[in-house]
Amino acid sequence: MAEAAVRKRGRGGGGAARRAARNTVSFETARYIERNIPNFEILNEEALEVIETNAETVLEEIGVNFVSNPGALERWRAVGAEIEGERVRIPRGLARELCKTAPSRITQLARNPERTVEIGGKSLVLAPVYGPPFVRDMAGGRRYATMDDFQNFVRLGYMSKWLHHSGGTVCEPTDVAVNKRHLDMLLAHMTLSDKPFMGSVTEPSRAQDSVDMCEILFGKDFVQENTVMTSLININSPMTFDEVMIGALEVYAANNQACIVSPFIVGGAMAPVSVAGTLTQVYAEVLTGIAYSQLVRPGAPVIFGAFVTSIDMNSGAPTFGTPEASQILYGAGQLARRLGLPYRSGGGLCGSKLPDAQAAYETAHTHNAALLGGVNFMLHSCGWLEGGLVSSFEKFVMDADQLGVLHQLARGVSVDTNGQAMDAIREVGPGGHYLGCAHTQANFKDAFWRSDLLDYKPFETWSEEGARDTQALASQRVKQLLADYQKPAMDPAIEEALHAYVRDKKASMPDAFV
Amino acid sequence: MAEAAVRKRGRGGGGAARRAARNTVSFETARYIERNIPNFEILNEEALEVIETNAETVLEEIGVNFVSNPGALERWRAVGAEIEGERVRIPRGLARELCKTAPSRITQLARNPERTVEIGGKSLVLAPVYGPPFVRDMAGGRRYATMDDFQNFVRLGYMSKWLHHSGGTVCEPTDVAVNKRHLDMLLAHMTLSDKPFMGSVTEPSRAQDSVDMCEILFGKDFVQENTVMTSLININSPMTFDEVMIGALEVYAANNQACIVSPFIVGGAMAPVSVAGTLTQVYAEVLTGIAYSQLVRPGAPVIFGAFVTSIDMNSGAPTFGTPEASQILYGAGQLARRLGLPYRSGGGLCGSKLPDAQAAYETAHTHNAALLGGVNFMLHSCGWLEGGLVSSFEKFVMDADQLGVLHQLARGVSVDTNGQAMDAIREVGPGGHYLGCAHTQANFKDAFWRSDLLDYKPFETWSEEGARDTQALASQRVKQLLADYQKPAMDPAIEEALHAYVRDKKASMPDAFV
């Protein structure tokens, strides 16, 4: 497997962690995907130009709001935008011009250098679910998420072969004060995993804490010179940039850390009910956010984000894995590539309350669209349930297994001599079979992707083993993975410094739940 | 919904059926899909040429076997092939040249003309599962299929909005003698549904029965001048054309009825373990079968078929919905289009024993690949379970609902003035919401595809209603549909003539179970 080249971690790796102990168990992680297949382009040139032109009209004539952020208004005024209250109207072409200093490809370093990822071009980096306040598993049902749950999701992510990234808020640890939980979350990502991770965005000061903790983990100069976090900046659609998210973006951009600038849209509520109208708004919003990041620091690493779903007009509920969502995903990818920017979208999105067939249909639609639509950073790749209200333990391992499908599909089709297999066809001939031929013997181990979870057994064996469905198989796998988990090696001095930072910071302020 | 234009049947329609009673309930059926999106092309020009060249080498140097069929050998000899025993070696270029008389698009007429389908170009016609000896439902579990089951699947197919075709052997009615069951199956398709259907291929004489019954249903001249059946001719891979299947093809081609010429391949057993090698063999086999159909009757309607899955090298079990299967589906579509032929592949394929998440992941992978890969005729679109051993009642309605996703995705993205939605963006502005704006009011009914089965309700409502998973929702839907079923109108004289044909034919021979 070329693209899915499996690398054992031999050393602690990554800055200070190089000096770490070497006596821990290794878990295989595939390299991030470099696609060897084309992108699927749903929009033709005319449609792309209509959307781009309309988005410039939106920025010029309607404008966007930067809320409670005089510094942002000043930055915009200085480059020629028209300011009226908190409304910013951007002359045609200016936002696109500002975006030109943003890099087309981002290297996000992990403390284990073998887990470092490239975001951009033909790459696809897979990160887990982000944000749910609830968790679910077969034994415990649906309940508020805790820090214990959070840590277990980080452990599962660390052990998931096809997952490249540890993510951010894999669930909301509701048993820790809101003003302190980001510290515990970062500590978990930094110590329980060695994959790259995301920073806090719920307050500019928490973004600064994220930078400070990274300086402990990687070294101060290292952080200023390299990107070690990719954080999620949601735009409050339609066309509103609030001071919390933009404050966090300002911290990250100033520190050379990557931001995903991403509208969060339920189509029909926060954007028009049409695909082209929604794409126009998405494009206008992302152009603005990315242009602004370049005003803060030209060259700051940013990702064109699109998280768009549609609404069920009967119930008002958001829906996921729908055809309109796929169309928007495909179209936004084309717009991002025309700007030369990395692209974030996709995920194992679904509206189902259980990790059942509905969940899997909807997830697979989004997984496929994200692969073919050129996504470079896929958040919510695994574990997402119930419209993002729930992080599901079973669905985490089910989806994480499915990510292997994307790796294999992305390899494309080899037509080298071995791939052509003419010797095999000659050897076997009409009416023969290929099981024992030389070509099969030489290739069978790597020829076909194989699930580590799904059931391929004959009916009789499967019945004897309890006739389990996918959820039941996943439940067993979750237990096994958590039982097998061992922490990756880490320099004890760094680990202690991180713990001390968290301890001191927590002691410095009373608990707050806003 | 343009492509999914829903048509109520107002009249009996179709030849003699025009005179039929008009007092039955109508069920909506969407028009077959005409894609307004591009195809996904996984192979580049170089790869396509390598595969095409190698396939010609296979035909010229290795050849294929036509078993127990002296007439076929004679036809091949007459056009310049080299015959050695049952082996046929075809000079480079000959098979492709012979394929040129095959039409690029087939109109298959239904007895209700509103259900007539076009197979070729950008079309996609959806047909149900074909072939399983077992059925499964939640109440009864897994059991041998009976004629009652068969009739119920035909009824469900008739009532499925997104299904265009009634199919063929929707399950094997094992309680009817093998030499007579095709008569009951055809009678069910002809009388319980008014959608197009498939003929029998298990004996040349049964293909002739299929033609004879169509002549009763449509009229004798009408059948000779029009295509009213699309039947499945499997090639016994590697490179073996047996007398039963080819005998059926000869009957259908001579009568101007369409055949799908389709290798049935479990990669690693019946073809090489590589994608390019398998595509080479598929192409060589289909070229041969289609060329032969044109020797029987130049201009006979034929479809380039590819049913390819891979083997689990651990257990030897066939696997479905795998990335290699998708790669082959995409590649074979490109090869078919370069020949200018309609293409059959895809389906709701899966290996799972239950209609659970595994079934849905695997099914969705194949559904998506079939839509984007340019399939014109998708067999096994709904109801397939357990590697094709089982027709599942629940999965039939689950998959049939999912086919709506493909209709909506195929519509593509409109950038007309309404699609651009600039008025809506102006009306709402930064910080507003779109739920009440004029554009939303004007478009919300048709804007988003909506499942008739999946659960979009909030957690609390769903819990109060029994916390049902997709299988449980589907079970309820199966019961409801079968309770609501009413036969489509039909000329009583024709219906009696069909019954009489079946009665007489059955009485003319003893039961046989081979």
Image: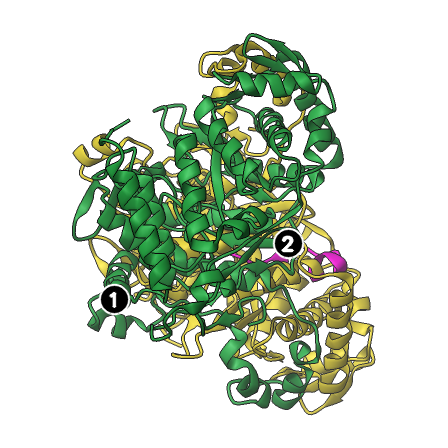
Chain colours: A green, B yellow
- Reply yes or no: does residue B345 show up in magenta: yes
Q: Give the residue pinned by disc 1.
A: A480
Q: Amino acid at mark 2?
A: Lys
| Vertical comparison of B472 with A37: above or below | above
Which quadrant of the structure image shows residue B427? top right
The crowding category of the residue bearing disc 2, from other C-alpha atoms within 10 Å (few below 14, some 14 to 19, many at least 20), is some
Q: Secondary structure at mark 1?
A: helix
Give x and y (percent) for residue A84: 60, 7
Looking at the image, is A352 positioned above or below residue B63? above
Q: Which kind of residue does numbered mark 1 sit on?
A: Gln
Question: Camera-side residue: B39 or B504?
Answer: B39
Q: Earlier in the sequence, mark 2 or mark 1?
A: 2
Between B330 and B166, the one lying in front of the other is B330
Residue B161 x/y as whole percent: 45, 37
Quarter placement of the N terminus of chain A: bottom right
Number of marks in the image? 2
Q: Is residue B84 visible?
A: yes
Quarter occupied by residue A457: bottom left
Residue drawn at point x = 33 percent, y = 63 percent: A492
Chain designation of label 1: A
Say which quadrant the C terminus of chain A sits in. Answer: top left
A494 relative to A236 in the view: left or right: left
Q: Residue at x 73, y 67 (%)?
A: B47
